[in-house]
Image (tube, grey):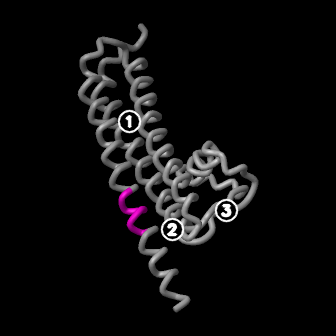
Amino acid sequence: MPGASVITDDIIAAIISILLVVVTTIIYYDVLRITWELLPKFKMSPRKRIIIVILAIFVGHTLAVWIYGVTYWVVAKYPFLGSLQGAYNTEFLDYVYFSVVTYSSLGFGDLLPLGAIRMISGVEALNGLVLIGWSISFTYLVMHDFWHLHKPKK
């Protein structure tokens, strides 16, 4: 039965996608939670605090991107789930690069997902948008809580 394999591949890709969203959300939550808990302990200017926040946000996003990159690299070992096509050498960092471009919704187009892996990359783009939006709201909360510490020049 030719269609049965496609359904199975799509279900596997959907399960992988759900797991990736859960794992990256938990990790990102913990990065922000730890940052929020540590930030008041730092006795420094608001400018330095916001730099710490931005660096923490980058750490969280980098972890998410690498988790997806590792997943693409592993999934590529099982061609029935799909593959990438385009200008790449099947090296590990090519999968991380594809993840960065997908997560950020930049989408250069030099790499194209084929097969069930397309679902994972589509979900990664949505996941990236959600986590990037979360970054914006977190930064706003930090600015709101610590902005009063800024002492204007007289």
Judging depth in this view, the residue of 46 and 40 nearest the camera is: 40
Q: CA distance from mark 3 to mark 2?
A: 12 Å
Asked if labels 2 and 3 touch by Cβ distance under 8 angstroms, the answer is no
Q: CA distance from mark 2 to mark 1?
A: 30 Å
Magenta residues, start to end: 14-19
Judging depth in this view, the residue of 94 and 49 nearest the camera is: 94
Judging depth in this view, the residue of 21 and 93 nearest the camera is: 93
Q: Amino acid at mark 3?
A: Leu
Q: Nearer the viewer, mark 3 or mark 1?
A: 3
Q: Residue at x 44, y 30 (%)?
A: 54
From the viewer's perspective, tell me whether residue 64 is left or right of residue 77. Answer: left
Q: Which residue is mark 2?
A: 119
Q: Earlier in the sequence, mark 3 or mark 2?
A: 3
Q: Amino acid at mark 2?
A: Met
Above or below, comparing residue 152 to residue 19 in the picture: above
Q: Nearer the viewer, mark 2 or mark 1?
A: 2
Judging depth in this view, the residue of 144 and 37 nearest the camera is: 37
Q: CA distance from mark 3 to mark 1?
A: 33 Å
Magenta region includes residue 17: yes
Q: Which residue is mark 3?
A: 112
Asked if labels 1 and 2 touch by Cβ distance under 8 angstroms, the answer is no
Q: Quadrant of residue 110?
A: bottom right
Q: Secondary structure at mark 3?
A: strand
Q: Which residue is mark 1?
A: 139
Point out residue 27 in the picture as x, y percentages from the top left corner.
34, 42
Q: Mark 2 packing: few (<14 Cα in 10 Å), some, or many (20+)?
A: some
Q: Secondary structure at mark 1?
A: helix
Q: Amino acid at mark 1?
A: Thr
